Image (spheres, rainbow, N blue to C red):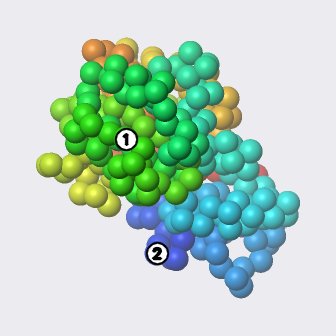
Amino acid sequence: MKKRLALITWSGLPQGAESERLMLPHLAAAGIGTQFVDWRSTNCDFSQFDLIVLRSCWDYHLRTAEFIDWLQRTAQATPVLNAVETVLWNHNKFYLREVEAMGIEIVPTIFVSHPKALGAEEATTIRSWKNKNIVVKPAISASAHNTRLMDDAQWSADQEAIRTMQGPFLMQPFIPEIQDQGEISFVYIDGRFSHAALKRPAAGDFRVQKEHGGSAELFHPDSNLLAQADQIAATVPQVRDSLYSRIDAVARDGKLVLMELELIEPELFLGMAEGAAKRFAEAIIRRVQ
């Protein structure tokens, strides 16, 4: 009997992202019927599918409670990848505290539950950062949504960038290597390295996402950087055990500093590297058969 696969997208991309469509011939050749479905679709019976793979559901962070409710209900009827437990862990950037506890170097971060939680200890930490430009980002966000750069050394909990944050947020020193050399995205499929992309911000910006004028190109990491990325993938079970993942990091004097782990709906740059779309399709085929 022919297997049925749903690739989850959002209303802004009813046919999915361009790079994801590169998988379709490989899936069809394996006898898998594939359909792109908006996760908010009200006329779709998700139980009809044999497997559901989250892909370009790029509005989930704007409707977090609704998305989590949909995810948990849907997973009761049909397997969802990445796993619900992984998505719940990854959707709030406070997971970085756990990653740091595993011995992985992350960007220096202050985890703030509420602006009023900022006090003398946090002020001391911020003053200790060499780069006085501070990035403020929501704990639940994607594509740098509502991420701000405070461009001077003066800050307080009364500043608008702090006051207007809704929910928990992170404060980090701006990492100049992002502008100087770019941010590296290491793509892993079934826990194994597939390919990497180098993302750069537009001139005068600090965000590398395409939505903000950023660019990306194929990147071939040297053996040292790849070994470090492999170590992260082996150390963090949510990466090691997932169908797909993206490790975003910057290289500082030959040492990877982790920015984020993307385990929900990352762009995987499947069109950049030869064979990448086929590798991802084959990983899905192994899971659905």
Residue 235 in the image, given as x and y percentages of width and height = 61, 21
Residue 109 in the image, given as x and y percentages of width and height = 46, 30
244 and 289: which is toward the camera: 244
Q: CA distance from mark 2 to mark 1?
A: 37 Å
Write the residue at 25% across / 52% down: 214
- Above or below, 232 against 111 in this view is above
28 and 112: which is toward the camera: 112
Write the residue at 41% across / 64% down: 18
Of the 4 image quadrants, the one containing the N terminus is bottom right
Farthest residue to the left: give it.
Answer: 203
Instruction: Tell me the tag on residue 5.
Output: none
Instruction: Tell me the tag on residue 156.
Output: 1
Q: Are marks 2 and 1 in contact (CB under 8 Å)?
A: no
> Seen in the image, is 38 located left or right of residue 223?
right
| Residue 67 shows in this picture | yes
Residue 196 in the image, given as x and y percentages of width and height = 38, 36
**Hey, which quadrant is residue 43 in on the image?**
bottom right
For disc 2, the marked residue is 12
Write the residue at 63% across / 27% down: 98
- Above or below, 103 against 237 in this view is above
Q: Amino acid at mark 2?
A: Gly
Q: Secondary structure at mark 2?
A: loop
> Seen in the image, is 195 located left or right of residue 208?
right
Count up the numbered dots: 2
Write the residue at 69% across / 48% down: 88
- Above or below, 193 against 26 in this view is above
> Seen in the image, is 129 located left or right of residue 60?
left
Give the mark toward the camera: 2 or 1: 1
Residue 191 in the image, given as x and y percentages of width and height = 60, 32
Q: Amino acid at mark 1?
A: Ser
Q: Earlier in the sequence, mark 2 or mark 1?
A: 2
